[in-house]
């Protein structure tokens, strides 16, 4: 990973599809190890990390997803990246058809147009999220930035720079 300018990390899993231990490994350990290798190999690289709405860096949440994403965020914030962007989207609307992991995702997908209209800061299209994550990661700047972007912030980026 030497000589990289930027990385976008989006690996994850759905709650309930793996054991708690596997979820922590995927959510925290893989993220932190990837970041460690990138930082040691390419110290000037910028890093975009896909977290999630509700991430809890205090570790007090009852939801494993929130605790683990928060733990990963906390570690990344202390890792020394010159430019770190943590994305916390809410519902990510998959623009390509897929097998939904559970009933609530099937329901959200079917009512997405209404959901997006009524609660625009609680949803984002997958392609808009991806474009935003790449755009900030490859933007070159001399100053150090550590930014946490909530769903409303991501949507504002998309509105400023539509696909």
Image: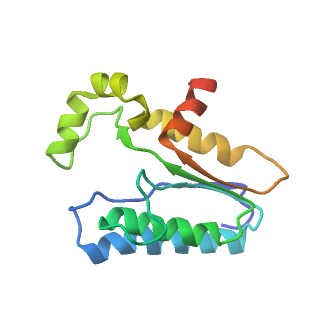
Name the one closer to the observer, 15 or 74. 74
| Residue 2, percent from left and from top | 71, 67
| Residue 52, percent from left and from top | 43, 53
Q: Quadrant of the C terminus?
A: top right
Q: Quadrant of the N terminus?
A: bottom right
Q: Is residue 64 visible?
A: yes
Q: Is residue 99 visible?
A: no
Q: Is residue 50 left or right of residue 79?
A: left
Name the residue: 53% across, 49% down. Answer: 87
Q: Is residue 140 left or right of residue 158?
A: right
Q: Residue furthest bottom?
A: 21
Name the residue: 34% across, 63% down. Answer: 65
Q: Is residue 85 above or below residue 18?
A: above
Q: Is residue 48 above or below residue 19?
A: above
The quadrant in which residue 3 appears is bottom right
> What colour scheme has been applied to the protein in the rendered image?
rainbow
How many tags in the picture? 0
Name the residue: 78% across, 57% down. Answer: 144
Name the residue: 36% across, 31% down. Answer: 95
Q: Is residue 62 above or below residue 126?
A: below
| Residue 43, percent from left and from top | 75, 68
The quadrant in which residue 81 appears is bottom right
Q: Is residue 14 left or right of residue 31?
A: left
Q: Residue furthest right?
A: 142
| Residue 160, percent from left and from top | 63, 25
């Amino acid at each position: 990973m030497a000589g990289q300018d930027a990385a976008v990390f989006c690996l994850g899993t759905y709650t309930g599809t793996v054991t708690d231990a596997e979820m922590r490994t995927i959510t925290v350990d893989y993220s932190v190890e990837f970041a460690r290798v990138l930082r040691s190999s390419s110290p000037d690289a910028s890093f975009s990390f896909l977290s999630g709405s509700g991430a809890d860096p205090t570790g007090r949440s009852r939801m494993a997803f929130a605790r683990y994403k928060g733990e990963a965020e906390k570690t990344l914030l202390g890792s020394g990246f010159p430019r770190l962007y943590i994305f916390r989207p809410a519902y990510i609307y998959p623009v390509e058809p897929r097998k939904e992991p559970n009933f609530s995702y099937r329901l959200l997908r079917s009512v997405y147009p209404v959901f997006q209209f009524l609660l625009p800061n609680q949803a984002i299209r997958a392609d808009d999220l991806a474009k935003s994550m790449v755009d900030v990661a490859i933007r070159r700047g001399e100053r150090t930035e550590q930014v946490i972007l909530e769903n409303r912030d991501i949507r504002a980026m998309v509105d400023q720079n539509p696909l």
